[in-house]
Amino acid sequence: MRILICTDGSFAAEQAALLVTRLGFPEETEYTVLGVSESDGDQVVLTTAFDRIEQLLGGPGPSIQRLMRYGNAADQIKDEAEAGNYDLVALGAKGHPHGIIGPRIGSTVNKSIRILTIPICIARNVPEKLERILICTAAEDFSLETLRAGGRLLTGTQAEIHLLHVMSQVALRLDSPSADLRDTAETAIRRGTREGRHLERGLDLLEQAGISNPVMPALRHGLVVDEVLSETVEGHYDLLVIGGHFQEGRIHWIEFLLDDVSGQLLKKSPCSVMII
Amino acid sequence: MQGDPFFWSDDNSYPALARCSIPDHERDISDTVPLLAKPVRGSYGALARRIAAKLGLFVVSISIFILALILVKEGAKPLAPLIRERFSVDSPASALGFGWLSASMVLSGSPIAATALAFLDARVLSANETFAMVAGSRLGASFIVLLVGFVYVLRGRQREVSLGAGLVSLLVTQSMYIPILAIGFFLLAQPWVQQWQIQAEGAVHSPLDVVFDPLIAFLTGYLPPWVLFPIGFGLLFFSLWLFDHLLPDLHLEESRLGQVHHLLYRPVVTFALGAGITALTMSVSVSLSLLVPLSTRGYIRRENIIPYIMGANITTFDDTLIAAALLANPAAVTVVLVQMVSVTIVSMFILLAMFRHYERFLNRLVSNIGRRRRNLAMYILLTLGIPFILLIFG
């Protein structure tokens, strides 16, 4: 496995390295610490940051590579991510999740999540140990692939994992089936509803991906962003895993029409977010 | 990163799963909703006949619509004392209540809005009062949905389904109309708004007056003038019903719009979609019903329905605008345009400045109203009581 940890010398970037260590990747994992210098004088700061991040990863070793690039940070991260065949890019989240004015995440993170095509992890409030992880899923084909990819990245963690699906539907007709709108995960699975079948399939996929701990399904009803955030807060999760990543091949005007749900979650989530 | 639909389910993407999960009696509802006739794929002759039939129906319905407007206008003149004194429709507040109650009773907003314009043309109402009555027509238009939903709740159906989109639709309209009224009255008070009117040196007459004047004269020779009002009102209904049969042949599930419910779209996108589709259907409820076949289970996403209704609330006035133009009354055109502009201003402000808060607020409100039967009954009482209070004390 190959992980790219990006730093601008800030504390947030060190949080990214810390989160990577909490994910329990196998020993043979290769780490590249990328520092991007956008102006003169950055180099000293970046070198110091490299040292600190190396310490966090267990000290200098053959599996850790240092790399310094020059130019726009997001563009350089994209170039390196594409050239290095990485499995995950880790960044730190600057800004405050409850900010009112201006971006609640840094501009590099903001741009990176729009242009990167591989899983990306944005670190925020990283705890001593990852206790609980929330994976969100939709009943769509591509979310199954996301579960496979996400599952592979989480195989090393011993955290309790929950699989959440949010139903935001309301009935347009008086003869619409009402039971589906009141289901819990358990009843949905038992009744074999569309959402229940999807959750069941998701649990299988996570198990096949190598997650050994039992995964708990959850089903909530309401506005998607609000329900995911509520679950994150109420459940005291340490990591939120979501889809919504840029998909290559999708027509641009469709991308333009779609709501930026992942962006909203990333801005408002109180914990780290992994976007598959 | 444009939001990829990762967290929400879609009702068509797994048709096999969806079919498995839905009992037979609740399945395939899309097939039970004959939206509109399918496009003709036959010969050119059949197509030509179909177009000719549509054109003929259009000419008939527009003629009846115009006749109805003239009859309502002529019939309203002798009713002026009754409306202003007996019904106390002598202020914008009472006109608002009058329009609201009338639309609730006749289960439709468009005929009431057109009637309000006829009242303006007959000098029964002022511009401000007409504006308020047209606004009231929108507030009362969705009442039927709530009433039917309540009956279903009483009969034991789940509230989630019985109220559903209807309650959201009603609440969107009700929550927006206080600022809309304020903006509308402000705009109507501005001298520059009067420039929206078409100015003419002489008296302006509709060319159709020439056709219909003899008919009106004939009718008034045999009937009391006030009788023209109920006749005209009935014809208004009939002509709007005929208009419904002129809708373009379209199966949304067969078009690219079939993707509409599939994903969470940016609010401004569903706003535009609601405005566009309602411009064709002229009715918010018909426009919403067009979305039903897109979902196997007859669901729509909460995130999509609110901006859709906001857009629909603007273009639902296009038949009222046509009525104003046909009356050839510049003030009536101004009133309708101010109405549409006011709705647009409030909608755009909500969409661009506070949509997520508004969406959350409405969602909570819907949950609270639907949580208990008592809450729902109180809400219905308020929805009926407020227009009465406006009419009596306004």
Image (cartoon, rainbow, N blue to C red):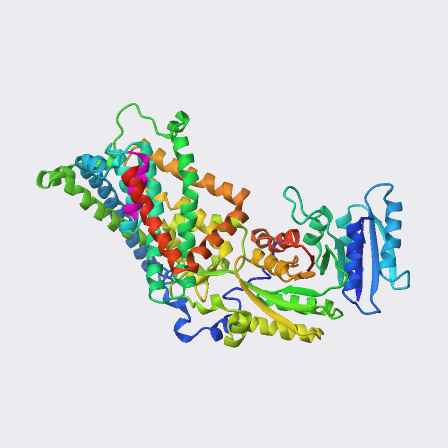
Question: Is B297 situated above or below A101?
Answer: below
How many numbered callouts? 0
- Which one is nearer the viewer's eye here, A159 or A255? A159
Name the side, left or right, on which A51 lies relative to A80.
right
Residue in the image at 88% along x and 50% along y: A48
- Indicate the quadrant where residue B69 lies: top left
Q: Residue furthest top?
A: B201
Name the side, left or right, on which B249 lies relative to A141.
left
Image: magenta residue range: B91-103
Rendering coords of residue A68 (x, y %): 86, 51
Name the side, left or right, on which B120 lies relative to A79.
left
- Residue B162 on the magenta span: no
Residue in the image at 81% along x and 51% along y: A7
Residue in the image at 44% along x and 59% along y: B371
Q: Is residue A151 visible?
A: yes
- Which one is nearer the viewer's eye here, B341 or A228? A228
Rendering coords of residue A147 (x, y %): 65, 68
- Which one is nearer the viewer's eye here, A265 or B326? A265
Q: Residue furthest front?
A: B374
Question: Is B11 situated above or below B214?
Answer: below
- Residue B99 on the magenta span: yes
Residue in the image at 32% along x and 47% along y: B385
The dominant secondary structure in magenta is: helix
- Indicate the quadrant where residue B314 lies: top left
Rendering coords of residue B163 (x, y %): 40, 59
